[in-house]
Amino acid sequence: MTITHIIQQTEQARTIISDTLTQLSMILDESSKFAHLANSMSHEIMQAWHHLSNAILLGGHHEND
């Protein structure tokens, strides 16, 4: 194996690694967006649950009156 061949192989490997890291970075960015969306949806569900619980409690108090 010549030095030139080793340099070419090294450059190819560097390019593959660089491209793969770029793709992984993009995947992580998209994953972060989905995680943020899921967190926001979870917050909305908790608010809705809170409102529902309050409505049930208030309804129960009215029935006892």
Image (cartoon, rainbow, N blue to C red):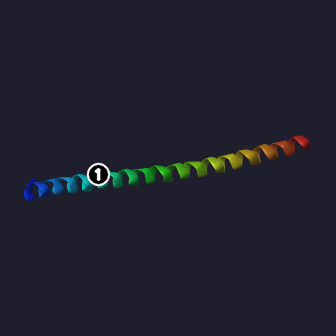
Query: Label 1 sits on what residue type?
Result: Thr
Residue at disc 1, secondary structure? helix
Task: Indicate the quadrant where residue 60 lies.
Answer: top right
Q: Is residue 60 left or right of residue 51?
A: right
Q: How many marks?
A: 1
Which residue occupies 46% across, 49% down? 34
Q: Is residue 37 left or right of residue 62?
A: left
Percent position of residue 10, x then y: 17, 56
In the picture as drawn, the residue positioned furthest to the top comes out as 63
Percent position of residue 26, x then y: 34, 53
Percent position of residue 44, x then y: 60, 49
Q: Quadrant of the C terminus?
A: top right
In the foreground, 46 or 5: 5
In the foreground, 1 or 28: 1
Which residue occupies 40% across, 53% down? 28
Does residue 64 sit above or below 35 in this rendering? above
Q: Is residue 11 left or right of residue 29?
A: left
Label 1 environment density (alpha carbons within 10 Å; few <14, some 14–19, many ≥20): few
Residue for badge 1: 20
In the foreground, 22 or 8: 8
Which residue occupies 13% across, 58% down? 7
In the picture as drawn, the residue positioned furthest to the front comes out as 1
